[in-house]
Image (cartoon, grey):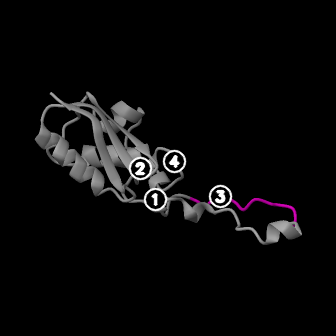
Amino acid sequence: MGFLKRIFKQDKPAGASTKAGRRPSVKKSAPKTEAAPTKAAVNTTAAADDDDIPACKVGLTGEFDESGLAKRVTLAFDEASGLDDVETLWVAQLSSKVVLKGKVPSQAILDKMVAVAKDVEGATAVDTSQVEID
């Protein structure tokens, strides 16, 4: 089945990538029309636009996605040679930290998963404290 399909119930979309960054096929939202800023608002920082999506929140096709990093990690697991879907392992994220939960058959598989997850753009750490070796 694959990690992406099992965990997020979706197939790999066209143009999906493990890289964080806007894809040419993803259109930027139309600018919002707002009233003129008040004097107090002029001195505040403007809200981030679509190009300022944090790497950990970039989805599979470059869009904003709260679970973007976790989805890109599952895609990387699916694309990595020698990593079959481990049906007892789940992938989550806490900001830019990848969190692996569940059971894996061996330390070698866990080590490979950690290496693959660390290579996904936007991942700053991988937490395996909730993983058990069978």
Magenta segment: 27-36
Coordinates of residue 31 in the picture (x, y in percent): 72, 62
Look at label 4 and name its amino acid: Asp
Near mark 4 (Cα within 10 A), the count class, few <14, some 14-19 or many ≥20, is: some
Q: Which residue is mark 1?
A: 55
Coordinates of residue 73 in the picture (x, y in percent): 33, 47
The CA distance from mark 3 to mark 1 is: 18 Å
Q: Is residue 53 left or right of residue 16?
A: right
Q: In which image quadrant can residue 84 be found?
A: top left
Q: Nearer the viewer, mark 4 or mark 1?
A: 1
Q: Is residue 85 magenta?
A: no
Q: Which residue is mark 3?
A: 29
123 or 64: which is nearer to us? 123
Q: In which image quadrant can residue 90 be found?
A: top left
Look at label 3 and name its amino acid: Ser
* Residue at 75%, 68% in the rendered image: 44
Q: Marks 1 and 3: in contact by CB < 8 Å?
A: no
* Residue at 26%, 45% in the rendered image: 77
The CA distance from mark 2 to mark 1 is: 8 Å
The CA distance from mark 3 to mark 4 is: 14 Å
18 or 52: which is nearer to us? 52
Sequence-wise, which precedes: disc 3 or disc 4?
A: 3
Sequence-wise, which precedes: disc 4 or disc 1?
A: 1
Q: Quadrant of the C terminus?
A: top left
For label 4, the SS is loop
